[in-house]
Image (spheres, grey):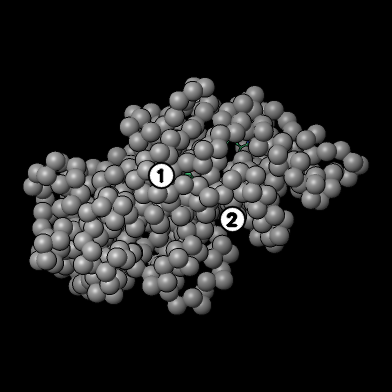
Amino acid sequence: MTPPLPRKILVTGGAGFIGANFVRLALAELPECRIVNLDRLTYAGNPANLADLEDQPRYRFVHGDIRDRELVDSIMAEEMIDTVVHFAAESHVDRSITDPDAFIETNITGTFTLLEAARARWLTAAGPGDTTTGTGGAGAGAANTSAAAANHNGGTTAVGETEIDGSGRKAGAERNPVAGDADPGIGDPAAAPPSPRFLHVSTDEVYGSLGPTGYFTEETPYDPRSPYSASKAAADHLARAYFHTYRLPVLVTNCSNNYGPYQFPEKLIPLIINNALEGRELPVYGDGRNVRDWLFVTDHCRALLTVLAAGLPGETYNIGGNNEQENIAIVEIICDLLDERVGPLPGGAPRRSLIRFVTDRPGHDRRYAIDAGKIERELGWEPAVGFTEGIARTIDWYLGNRAWLDGVLDGSYREYYRRMYAHR
Ligand code: NAD
Ligand code: DAU
């Protein structure tokens, strides 16, 4: 049987790094889907990331803020949105340390606004298939929550405990083929409207910092330590609360560090690539021995499509690359690959000579490492792109897209860089 996959997707933050990669992958992998991308185009949102999709009839860009409830409501109704994939966020830890306000606004208030809009649309309106915005009807979203409620509450009756269409089929089952409870009678995506899903995209940073051993699992208690991770943790708690309280079909993913095309050069890998190309110093915080678990961005996006297709509402899925690296190792790998590709620096020095150890990030988390066993076991996802391949592809993408890079290295970037690094 073919589970009905999401078809009318509201992507938030789709002009950013991961969002742009996701929009491209989803349009390619889900030929029937339509994507509406709501993005405020902050410094991190770049229309150039999706410029070639302008004429794609299944794609629409809306320039706006996720905190604008009226706008979100109108998109949900007009486009009959059945799936929200929520990326929009302030995402850079260093900026959260110097300017935390926007993190509270977008990451917490913005997520709250989206959850409320989804609740109003799916649980109190007539559901994603209805173009009216009235209240009172039991929407598909309300119906859809029953399977998940049974799953998590040992079969107790919960809000929205109804069948989806009177067939005896429990809502939610059609997206859960992996758990073995899918109804083989549901096969035609054109006939069966997809059940609503709210996929909240989060980070492994909510779990805090690890010592030399151990891994973050879905049960690891939250211990966020930067304004960024604290704001994401707050958003995760809200998202989960909407499942438990209202049975809004929320799924949460917590992913490790992404890298790949379209990443803004404030983050380690593109910053080092850019500086190394320009022959500038390569700032490594502290002793350079902090560890991150790096995942190629397309693998993250594939994991999100997997969770949408087969994940259970109310569940959390950790996503990681099984690829722990010390920062200094990452920087050295980039230096060596660039030397190979474009030759050493003028004068013949290797790019490693540009490395400078600088003042550490305040509260710098020492080590992140994800145990991605659950998504692998339950949904069959695992990373496909190893680090050797992924970092080479990433470097080649930046070398082949110098115009994109020049486009983002504008005055505001230069000012950011000066402010963040001049006195480090
Ligand atoms: P990004 O900073 O590259 O992009 C964020 C996007 O959100 C931008 O397009 C920006 O314009 C948009 N945005 C910001 N505020 C907005 C608002 N108020 N309304 C509408 N749009 C707004 O971020 P990213 O690295 O692509 O991360 C995307 C999501 O994935 C975030 O939620 C982040 O927490 C999460 N995440 C990122 C990583 C990573 O390594 N980059 C890892 C795990 C999870
Ligand atoms: O773990 C997932 C998180 O990964 C995401 O939630 C965040 O949105 C994303 O920004 C990323 O956070 P990090 O802080 O781990 O990423 P960043 O690229 O900023 O830094 C990676 C490591 O490199 C970190 O230990 C700090 C260090 N670093 C970073 C910069 C920008 C340096 O040593 N020098 C630098 O100039």
Up-down: is 228 above or below 11?
Answer: above
Q: Which residue is mark 1?
A: 376
What secondary structure is found at the residue carrying circle 2?
loop
Q: Is residue 337 left or right of residue 241?
A: right
Mark 1 and mark 2 residues within 8 Å of each other at the beta carbon: no
Residue 367 spot, x, y in % from top left: 52, 28
Dot 2 amino acid type = Tyr
Query: How many other residues sit within 10 Å of disc 1, few (<14), some (14-19) or many (≥20)?
Result: some
Query: How many other residues sit within 10 Å of disc 2, few (<14), some (14-19) or many (≥20)?
Result: many
Q: Is residue 343 left or right of residue 246?
A: right
For the residue pair 186 and 171, the one nearer the viewer reads as 186
**Nearer to us: label 1 or label 2:** 1
Residue 272 spot, x, y in % from top left: 68, 42
Question: Which callout, 1 or 2, points at the residue further toward the start of the chain?
Answer: 2
Asked whether mark 2 lies closer than 8 Å to ligand 1, one says yes
Residue 117 spot, x, y in % from top left: 26, 58
For the residue pair 270 and 69, the one nearer the viewer reads as 270
Q: Is residue 192 left or right of residue 316?
A: left
Q: Is residue 129 left or right of residue 322?
A: left
Q: Residue furthest right?
A: 347
Point 64% across, 49% down: residue: 389
Residue 4 spot, x, y in % from top left: 30, 66
Query: Where in the image, quadrant-wise, is ligand 2 located?
Result: top right
What secondary structure is found at the residue carrying circle 1?
helix
Q: Quadrant of the C terminus?
A: top right
Up-down: is 238 above or below 55?
Answer: above
Q: Quadrant of the N terminus?
A: bottom left
Q: Which residue is mark 2?
A: 262
